[in-house]
Amino acid sequence: MINISSVIEISGTVAFAISGSFSAMQKRLDVFGVLIMGFVTAIGGGTIRDVLIGHTPVGWMRDYQLPLIILGTVIATIFFKKYIKIFKTTLFLFDALGLGLFTIIGIQKGIDAGLNPGVCVALGTITGCFGGVVRDILLNDIPLIFRKEIYATACIIGGTLYMLLIDHLSTDVVEIVAVAVVCAIRIVAVKYELSLPKFYA
Amino acid sequence: MINISSVIEISGTVAFAISGSFSAMQKRLDVFGVLIMGFVTAIGGGTIRDVLIGHTPVGWMRDYQLPLIILGTVIATIFFKKYIKIFKTTLFLFDALGLGLFTIIGIQKGIDAGLNPGVCVALGTITGCFGGVVRDILLNDIPLIFRKEIYATACIIGGTLYMLLIDHLSTDVVEIVAVAVVCAIRIVAVKYELSLPKFYA
Amino acid sequence: MINISSVIEISGTVAFAISGSFSAMQKRLDVFGVLIMGFVTAIGGGTIRDVLIGHTPVGWMRDYQLPLIILGTVIATIFFKKYIKIFKTTLFLFDALGLGLFTIIGIQKGIDAGLNPGVCVALGTITGCFGGVVRDILLNDIPLIFRKEIYATACIIGGTLYMLLIDHLSTDVVEIVAVAVVCAIRIVAVKYELSLPKFYA
C-alpha cells in the first residue's frame, strides 16, 4: 500500500535536491559539487535537527532509500537541466508540500524528545528551512530565507497551529491542516510577491 | 534570591543578541533574519560546545527562559535601534562580562565531562566566541575574531588562569578572577586598540 | 615500536594544518585566526564525522597528542613561511597520504557503527575532505573541492574499493590498496591537471 505522507516526503526531497543541484550548476561547480549541493539541500535541515537533539547516527545514515532517490534526482537534474524551467510551477508546488511535511516531521521529533512547544516549532522550522541555509552558505551567499520571501514564516505559522491543535483534534487532521497552511502561505506569498518588513540599522 | 551569575549570564546573552540582530539590520535582512541572527549570536557558542561534547538536546532546548529573553531583546533592538549607539559603552561592558562568564561556563562543562585542561580552555573559548563566528559566516563575512581585536585571546588567557588556579583556590574566587581577567583584557584591548600580530604569507 | 599508520596519520594532520594556517596567512588573519584555521583544517573532517554518528566527545577532545602536534605545526608554519614553497611537493605527498588514511579511518568508524556501505564511503569522504570545506567557508570562499581538481572523487573511488574488497582480503592488504589508490588518483589528477566535468545551468 502506498503511504501518502511518504510520497509527499519523497516529492519534497526531490524538489529540494533539484533546487540544490540547480543552484550549484549556476555557480559553475563541478559534478561532485553539484551532487553534494543536491544532498545537502535535501537532507541538511533534518541533519542539523538530529544533531541538535542528539538523534545520531543522523537520519539519512539509517535510510537506504533516500540517498538513492537524491542521487537519481541529481543525475536527472544534470541531464535535463534545459527542461527544468518548464516544470518551474510543479517544482514550486513540490517544494511547498515538502516544506510543510518537513516542518511536521521536525515538530513530531521534538514532541517525541519531550521538548517544549516553542522548541518543537523551532525544530520544524529548522527541518524545513536549514537545508537551504546550508546550501547558501556553501555557495557563499547570505541565506536567501533571511533576505526575501516569506519562507520560514510559513513554517512558524503552520507549526504553531500544529502545537495549538494537537491536543484537541486527531493527529491526521492536524497534520493535514498544518501542511495545508504552510503550502497556502507559500503560494500566496509567491503569487503576490509578499515579503517580510525590513528595519535597516 | 537573585543569583548574581545568572544575572551576568542574562546580561551577556542580551548583549550578544543585540549584537547579532544589529549586524543583521545593517546587512538589510528581513525581520525573520534579524530574529535568527539574534538567537544564533546569543546561543551559537553554547550550541556548538554541547554538540561537540554530546550534551544533547543542546542547552537552549532545555531552557524556557533564555529563548524568551532573546526574543524580547531582538524585538526591543528593532524598535529602539536609533538609541542603540547611545548605550554603546554599556553594551560593550555587558558583552565583556558575558564573554567572561560564557568562558567559565564552557570550561566547567568540559571539567564535568572529564576532558583534559587544554580541551576545557578550548570549550570555554568556543562558548564565548563561536556565536559571533556563526553570525559572521551567516552574514557572509570572514569571522571578525580571526581578523582584528583581542577577543578569543582574552578567553584563552582567562580560561588558562582558571585551570591553573582551580585546584588551589575556592571555585567562587577562581570564577571571579577569571571573569575579571577576561573583562580587563577586553577593556584594555579596546581602549588602546590592541590587536594580535599578523604574519602574511 | 613505531606504528606505520599513526606515522601516516600524523604526517597527514601536519600537511592539513600547514594548508589551513598558510591559507589563513594569505587572507591576512591574525595569529589566533591562523591557529584556528590550522586546527579546523586538520580536525574538521573527523569532527563532523563524529558529530554525525554521535561519537562524542569528538575525537580530538579525547586525544592529548594531536592538538599539540597541530599547535607545533602552526607555529612552525608561521616562522618558516618563506620556505614552505620549497617543500611544496613533499607537502602535496603528505596531503595525498593523509587524505587516503583519513578516508580509511572514516570508513572504519562507519563499519564499527554498523552503517550501510554507501554511508561508510560518505563518512570516509567527509573525514578526508570536510576539514578543507570548513576552512574555505570560514575564509569566505566557495569550497575548493566543489570547484576544481579531483579530490573528493579520489576518496569515493578508494573508499568504494575498500568496501568491495574488505570481505575478500585481509584488512591490512585492503587498507594499503585503498590508500595507494587515493594517493595515485590525486597524483595523476594534479600531474595531468585533470578535473571533473562541469554542467552549467
Image (cartoon, coloured by chain):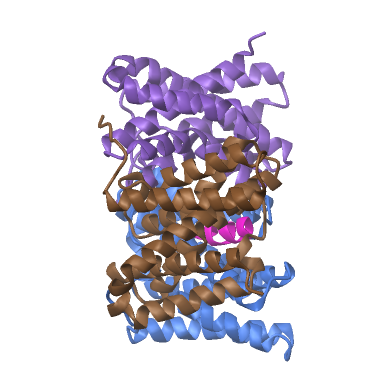
Chain colours: A purple, B blue, C brown
Residue that appears at 64% across and 53% down: C172
Q: Is residue A9 left or right of residue A167?
A: left
Q: Quadrant of the C terminus of chain B?
A: bottom left
A101 or B37, nearer to the observer: A101
Would you place residue C169 above or below residue B180 in this image? above
Q: Does residue B50 show up magenta in the picture? A: yes
Q: Quadrant of the N terminus of chain B?
A: bottom right
C160 or B30, nearer to the observer: C160
Would you place residue B190 above or below residue B169 in this image? above
Q: Position of residue C6 (x, y in %)?
A: 59, 66
Magenta: main secondary structure: helix
Q: Does residue A160 show up magenta in the picture? A: no
Q: Position of residue C127 (x, y in %)?
A: 53, 52
Would you place residue A29 above or below residue A64 in this image? below
Please report the bounds of the magenta region as a residue range. B41-52
Residue that appears at 41% across and 38% down: A37
Q: Position of residue A71 (x, y in %)?
A: 47, 28
Q: Position of residue C169 (x, y in %)?
A: 65, 43
Residue A122 in view in this figure: no
Would you place residue A52 above or below residue A60 in this image? below
Q: In which quarter of the view is residue B91 placed?
A: bottom left
Residue A27 in view in this figure: yes
Q: In which quarter of the view is residue C77 placed?
A: bottom left
Residue that appears at 56% across and 69% down: C7
